[in-house]
Image (spheres, rainbow, N blue to C red):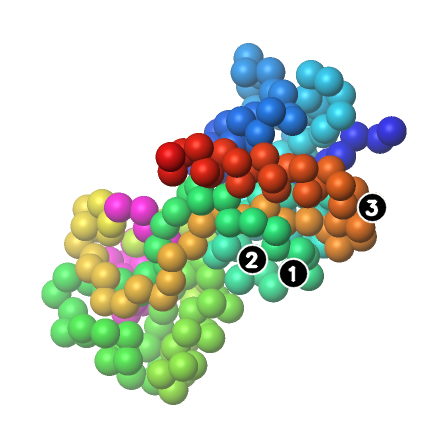
Amino acid sequence: MDPIKIALPKGRLLTPALTLLSQTGIIQVDPDLDFERRLTMHTTDGKWQFLLVKPADVPIYVEYGAADLGIAGKDVLLETGRQVCELADLGIGRCRLIVAVPEESRITKASDLVSGSRVATKFPRIAREYFATYGVQVDILKLNGSIELAPKAGLATAIVDITETGATLAQNQLRIVDEIRWVSARLICNRISYKLHYSLIQEILEKLQAGEERNVG
């Protein structure tokens, strides 16, 4: 039987994702492999194949069936809007989607921004929908990195970004004025693969749930 393919995000989620999958007792990963330098790898038993891709690409691989399963942040799922089955909140990679402004700004909440204000973000879809709830038409500037620099450089009035501790925001003299939502990593599945591998996927979900219960206990 061909191996089940799992798309994993490179970066901050990769190590906790592999650790969590190994703890299920189903997937055995060689700890000596250099994951960040690889594009694909197989588990020691050959039953699983990992595709190591950029976080924003995980839902694409899963939607189109290049991967059966994937692990993606809820922020990525909201932003991409891909048609996948969201199976479980894995509880890893928890952070907040926030709106932040320079410390000296008079803005105290997102609704204080005037129409036409520039907002820098990696998440244009999320930002646009969020400000629309306040009836504020902002000018969304999509950046791919160093979002905190935009207000300093005079490029934007505010930013929409994710933060775990808020330390990077503070280092760049930014303060949070609104919290959009908490996000965390989710296990996702291709719709056809969910039917084809239903029993195995349910077994994985049961193992993950058992692991959560042990951690709580």
Q: Which quadrant would residue 28 be assigned to in this image?
A: top right
The magenta stretch spans residue 39: no
**Label 3: few (<14), some or many (≥20) within 10 Å?**
few
User: Which amino acid is tagged 2?
Assistant: Leu
Report x, y in % for residue 32: 55, 12
Would you name the residue on which mark 3 appears? 196
Give me the C-alpha separation between circle 2 and circle 3: 23 Å
Q: Sequence order check: which comes first, mark 1 or mark 2?
A: 2
Residues under numbered marks 1 and 2 in contact, where contact means CB atoms less than 8 Å apart: yes
Query: Residue at image x 56%, y 25%?
Result: 22
Report the quarter where the N terminus lies. Answer: top right
Is residue 69 depicted above or below 191 in this figure? Answer: above
Is residue 169 depicted above or below 138 in this figure? Answer: above
Q: Sequence order check: which comes first, mark 3 or mark 1?
A: 1
Query: Residue at image x 38%, y 57%?
Result: 182
Residue 200 can be seen, yes or no: yes
Q: Which quadrant would residue 4 be assigned to in this image?
A: top right
Tag nearer the camera, 2 or 3: 3
User: Which amino acid is tagged 1?
Assistant: Arg
Q: Closer to the camera, 112 or 209?
A: 209
Q: Which residues are magenta?
A: 149-165
Report x, y in % for residue 139: 41, 76
Report x, y in % for residue 103: 15, 61
Report x, y in % for residue 210: 52, 36
Is residue 16 depicted above or below 34 in this figure? Answer: below
The dot on residue 77 is 2
Q: Secondary structure at mark 1?
A: loop
Q: Closer to the camera, 81 or 212?
A: 212
Give me the C-alpha separation between circle 1 and circle 2: 7 Å
Would you name the residue on which mark 1 appears? 82
